[in-house]
Image (cartoon, rainbow, N blue to C red):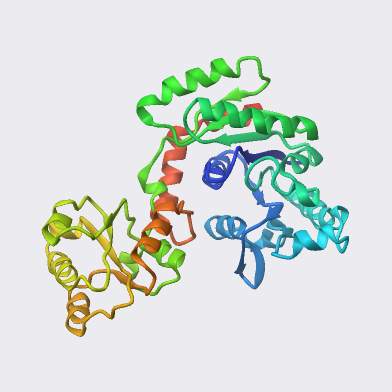
Amino acid sequence: MSKKIFIAATGQDCGKTTTSLSLIHLARKKYKRVGFIKPFGPKLISYKGRQIDMDAALISHIYNLEDDLEYMSPVVVESHTTRQFLDGEISTQQLYEPLDRAIAVLEKKCDFLIIEGAGHAGVGAVVGLSNAQVAARYQAPVLLVTGGGVGHVIDSVHLNLALFREAGAEVRILLPNKLIPAKRTSALGYLEKAFASQPFKVVGGFNYSPILADPTLRHIAKLLGLQLHATDEQSLRIAHHLQMGAAATQRVVDLLQPATMLVVTSSRDELLVMLASLYHMPEFQSKIAGLVIPGLSPVADIVQRILKDAGIPYMRTTATTADVFSRIREDVSKIGPEDYQKISLIQQLAETELCFETIDALI
């Protein structure tokens, strides 16, 4: 029988998958057979001929878990699943059957099993498979990941605790994540005071890292559904800043910060030419991550040739500048299998920012 841990969160984008990646990396130093399962998969992709959750595919790819792939994403959710359930076409028991089989197999095969939830404690409740219900069914101790801060964290933790308690699941670890380094000690201290009467322990997670939080050019292209004109190396570059190219040309140049993604409308010939020319210079290559060129007006042929000659990464769309800028600004970058720099950094940081011995002792 394997040791189990259920990775939950107070909401989306707290860092569940980053935590799972880290725990697998650290657990492998102690346990021979470490497994992973995403019981309830709301974000489907096609991987190795299967429709599975994207996080299960990511973990399988990184840690070579293809032999367990059929068990790693047993319940997949499609757009019609909720309606089918409410119409009585499928039942909770039907959904639990493949999950029960997968958990049973992985418990026998593994010494340490990570069960990663989806979203907050109530996600999946509509079909009877909420995170709280799944954790309770398999008697898996819960590690609850939160964002950084104090007040908001306390409020969201109490909201989620109610659901876990109602289901009979036991939260043993609170992992505040994305902590501001200068405030880490203070924030953790206040959270320990706030939850001193609770039966779980507060364990510090990752500090906030722009490298982990910001998107690659490939991610932006995928987000916008655009073709990225760039080399493979350029496509993996991380854009740490986003800038609207709306000011005068010289002002746009003066405002450039390291690794800036610029949104420049297709009618700004002079600005596009200037940025392409600057890209030839090493000091500006470090500042210009790439371009998104929106607008209905076609890019002039000579400007197109200059962009190509400069080798500056760019993508073209007929969407409005405001739409492109807001979609990039509002997006939270997810880690993909090709994000080798981010994955490597997560594994390195895990060894210094996460105390696996403490987590392991509490489950």
The N terminus lies in quadrant:
top right
Q: Is residue 132 left or right of residue 324?
A: right
Q: Residue at x 44, y 45 (%)?
A: 346
Q: Residue at x 65, y 49 (%)?
A: 35
Q: Is residue 117 above or below residue 328?
A: above
Q: Is residue 317 left or right of residue 3?
A: left
In percent of width and height, residue 98 lies at 81, 58
In percent of width and height, residue 226 lies at 41, 72
* Farthest-out residue, bottom: 301
Q: In which quarter of the view is residue 300 placed?
A: bottom left
As rendered, which of 306 and 359 lies closer to the eye?
306
Q: Is residue 163 above or below residue 277?
A: above
As rendered, which of 133 and 123 lies closer to the eye?
123
Q: Residue at x 48, y 54 (%)?
A: 335
| Residue 359 in view (yes/no) | no
In percent of width and height, residue 71 lies at 72, 58
Q: Residue at x 39, y 75 (%)?
A: 227
In percent of width and height, residue 202 lies at 56, 24
| Residue 127 in view (yes/no) | yes
Q: Is residue 23 above or below residue 327?
A: above
As rendered, which of 232 and 252 lies closer to the eye?
252
Q: In which quarter of the view is residue 171 placed?
A: top right
Q: Is residue 209 above or below residue 298?
A: above
Count of numbered circles in the view: 0
The C terminus lies in quadrant:
top right
Q: Is residue 285 left or right of residue 221?
A: left
Q: In which quarter of the view is residue 359 placed?
A: top right
